[in-house]
Image: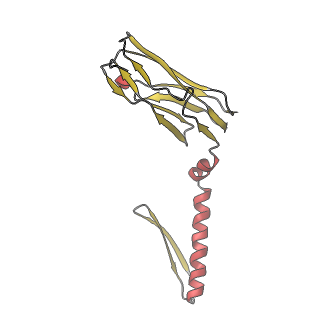
């Protein structure tokens, strides 16, 4: 009996060749599939995804969509969230895709949390052209990334 495992166009292909009876070939195929499953679950990426034990809340207060209609010289606010659960490596919390391409980050050291706002990032950028922008607030530990898109209105009535 021989078992061949290959990857084709995003699919895992298992080929089993055997001179055994149909029942023997089915058993061999199942054994091959179980071996592949064990390999997949022991991979570092699969293990890391399974170990993600933190979540990013959508923010506190929940509504963090901002409007600057009075044309200040700078746009200055902050985004915050509750990172809950536990993590054993640093989590980067930040905001990206702000007007003008600006982004800001901060780092949460390994730890745990349940209900306290523990992640916040402030931004202070020069005035930008009028419009509606959609910055992304995110948290990542390098393996798992969670995000929420916000609305930021500049120079238009709120």
Q: Position of residue 18 (x, y in %)?
A: 54, 84
Corner quadrant of residue 144: top right
From the viewer's perspective, tell me whether residue 87 is left or right of residue 104. Answer: right
Outermost residue toward the top in this view: 73
Q: Position of residue 66 (x, y in %)?
A: 44, 22
The quarter of the image holding the C terminus is: top left
Q: Position of residue 57 (x, y in %)?
A: 58, 35
- Residue drawn at point x = 67 percent, y = 38 percent: 85
The quarter of the image holding the N terminus is: bottom right
9 up-or-down from 21: above or below: above
**Colour setup of the view:** secondary structure
- Residue drawn at point x = 59 percent, y = 79 percent: 28
- Residue drawn at point x = 62 percent, y = 44 percent: 52
18 up-or-down from 113: above or below: below
Q: Position of residue 104 (x, y in %)?
A: 47, 24
Comparing 98 with 10, the one in front is 98
Callout count: 0
Comparing 75 with 60, the one in front is 60
Outermost residue toward the front in this view: 158
């Amino acid at each position: 009996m021989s078992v061949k495992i290959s990857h084709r166009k995003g699919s895992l292909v298992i080929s089993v060749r055997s001179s055994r009876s149909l029942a023997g070939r089915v058993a061999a195929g199942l054994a091959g599939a179980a071996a592949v499953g064990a390999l997949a679950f022991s991979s570092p990426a699969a293990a890391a995804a399974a170990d993600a034990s933190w979540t990013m809340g959508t923010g506190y207060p929940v509504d963090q969509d901002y409007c600057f209609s009075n044309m200040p010289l700078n746009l200055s606010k902050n985004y915050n969230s509750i990172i809950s659960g536990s993590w054993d490596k640093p989590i980067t919390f930040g905001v990206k895709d702000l007007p003008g391409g600006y982004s800001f980050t901060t780092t949460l050291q390994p730890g745990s949390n349940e209900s306290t706002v523990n992640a916040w990032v402030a931004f202070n950028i020069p005035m930008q052209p009028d419009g509606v922008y959609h910055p992304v607030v995110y948290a990542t530990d390098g393996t798992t990334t969670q995000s929420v898109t916000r609305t930021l209105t500049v120079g238009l009535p709120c």
